[in-house]
Amino acid sequence: MSKAQHQGSTRTIPIIPRELVKNGKQCWIVRVPSDLVGTGPARKFFNEKKPAIDFCKKLTAVRGSPAFEFLDMTPSQLTDAVSLWRTFSDLTTEELLQAVALWRSSKRASGSPVADVVQLCLDSKAESGVRPNYLKTLKCTLKNFTASHMCDVSTITSAQVSTWLNGNGWQPKTRLGYLKDVSTLFKFAMKRGIVTSNPCDGVDRPRLDHKPPVIFTVEQCKALLNVCRENDPALLGYICPILFGGLRPAEAQKLVVENVRDGVIDLSGAQSKLRKRRVVVVNATLRRWLDVPGVRFGNINLTKRMRKLVKLAGATWSHDVLRHSFCSYAMTKFGARAAAEMAGHSEQVLFAHYREIVSVESANEFWAI
């Protein structure tokens, strides 16, 4: 194949065999791309599929070989290549490896599509052992961001991030979460040397109107627990550690019998949100409910079963309503410091997100359920 023939080619479609019938017989044809034709035939027939596939693999290998790339180089490029080789031939092995590392870093910085950096970021987070729920949320946000930014990550500006964030009709709380996720992406890219700055730093943070959390009344709690005891007592092992113990839903879902012993709920690092050991004292109310016959830990199909219970109890479900209820009644009964400690977060978080005002009478009635 001549160099002129190669330079005149523009066809780079994948090389695959096609099945057809020739002279009444089944066969496979491989159409050789024009850049690989040379002096041979432009197509070749095979009686069996495997030889056709093998021939396609050979053509593909030839196209990707250094010799084939050599044919596409201009005289000037050939001169530069020879000069570069002479420079490298004088380097030690350690110097050569350093040069390659610098070249790769430069290449990433000068050309890194958003989709590639997103995948690197997600892989890194998964390897570091972040919570599955966090990784799932991060992946969802960055997938949306990637769909709107099919470009080099280093070219993205604060204005582009702001337009994406504020132009989709999302609520302020959603926008704030998305901004944090995208900022995580650029912080990762900065650590890897892919970008030099974080465009999210120049985006105004959405302002939130803090609303009181939704909690269950004492009567609603009673109704839900009684319906659960009558229809699905095993699920009390999920509901009660949240409602009376302050566990997070994900923590309650991971509970096993071995975690509840000696008057405490003892969670290992992998079971808690912050990956730190968490010990919760089993108070008298929680103990009575965990002693109900049929209680089980590690329940499955939670969404479907909880939906059924809430409907039977005539209650209205709200995000994290069980934990919000615990924090509100616990604060009135035991004080902010104790309630925050039982819930596993700070007093600041308690006041900002979890506490609704309840009377002393309601709190006493709640803890006497």
Image (cartoon, rainbow, N blue to C red):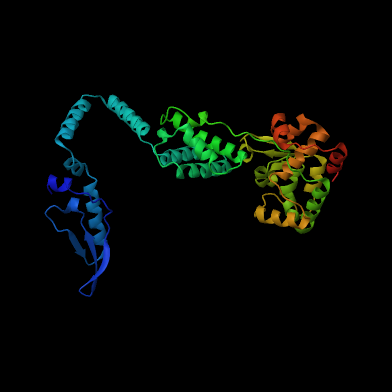
Q: Nearer the viewer, residue 183 or 85?
A: 183
Residue 262 can be seen, yes or no:
no
Which residue ends up furthest to the bottom in the rendered image? Answer: 24
**Residue 354 location in percent, x, y?**
72, 37
**Residue 189 location in percent, x, y?**
45, 32
Relative vertical location of residue 87 with respect to residue 328 in this rendering, above or below: above
Going by the image, does 42 lie left or right of 219? left
**Residue 169 location in percent, x, y?**
57, 44
Going by the image, does 284 lie left or right of 141? right
Residue 148 can be seen, yes or no:
yes
Q: Residue at x 23, y 60 (%)?
A: 30
Q: Nearer the viewer, residue 151 or 64?
A: 151
Going by the image, does 111 lie left or right of 313? left
Q: Residue at x 59, y 36 (%)?
A: 176
Relative vertical location of residue 147 with respect to residue 335 in this rendering, above or below: below
Quarter of the image where one finds residue 344: top right
Going by the image, does 110 lie left or right of 287? left
Relative vertical location of residue 235 with respect to residue 174 in this rendering, above or below: below
**Residue 106 location in percent, x, y?**
34, 30
